[in-house]
Image (spheres, rainbow, N blue to C red):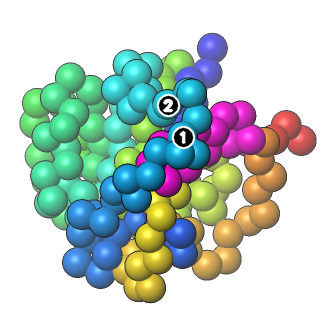
Amino acid sequence: MNGKIILNLAMSLDGYIADEQGGYEWIVGDGNSTLNTENKWEHNKFLEDIDVVVMGRKCYDQGFHKDFKDIDVYIATSQDIDNYENYHFIGTDILNTIINLRNEGKNIYLFGGGGVIDNFTKADIIDEYIIGIIPTILGKGRKLFLENNPKIDLDLNYYSVEDGIIVMKYLKRNK
């Protein structure tokens, strides 16, 4: 049985995943619960089914890898860095490495950043897109989707609203 490659992150209403410095302090709700749905997105529950986390070097440099002590973390980097503990550094061919892990039945969490995600988007190998829309227009920063992507049709599988944040889960549509 194949695993899944799952993109899961928050973005501003205008499509940014971080400000220009990589900051994410703006990822908060508006405090208004009047439109909240009964169902709530539970990130910790999501992580229970994840076997591998993939992130770029900038995310690693910001210390995000420390949030995943019990999960294999693959970091895309152009530098030659030795693996240690559960952290694996990949300089080339990250797509094939991750596809092979998915084919072994592992569920892969695409954590970020935009450059790493762009490779997976352009190759059209993401199985699920879980996007939290933050009620903020940043105006500039690091975009989620870069230019020249293929057309990818999706089906809405889940949504929730909590304090103005809308979480949507899309599955890749069967062709």
Q: Which residue is mark 1?
A: 36
Residue furthest to the right in view is 175
Q: Which residue is mark 2?
A: 40
| Corner quadrant of residue 121 | bottom right
Residue 128, placed above or below residue 107: below
What is the quadrant of the C terminus in the image? top right
Residue furthest to the top in view is 1
The magenta stretch spans which residues?
Answer: 156-172
Q: Residue at x 51, y 20 (%)?
A: 104
Q: Are marks 1 and 2 in contact (CB under 8 Å)?
A: yes
Residue 88 on image: x %, y %: 23, 40
Number of numbered markers: 2
In the image, 16 versus 138, the foreground residue is 138
Q: Label 1 neighbourhood size at 10 Å, few (<14), some (14-19), many (20+)?
A: some
| Corner quadrant of residue 62 | bottom left
Most common SS among magenta residues? strand
Residue 34, placed above or below residue 91: above
Which is in the foreground here, disc 1 or disc 2?
1
Residue 32 on image: x %, y %: 44, 52
Q: Residue at x 26, y 71 (%)?
A: 22
Residue 12 in the figure: left or right of residue 85: right
Question: Does residue 109 show up?
Answer: yes
Residue 70 on image: x %, y %: 20, 23
Three-letter code for the amino acid on which mark 1 is drawn: Asn
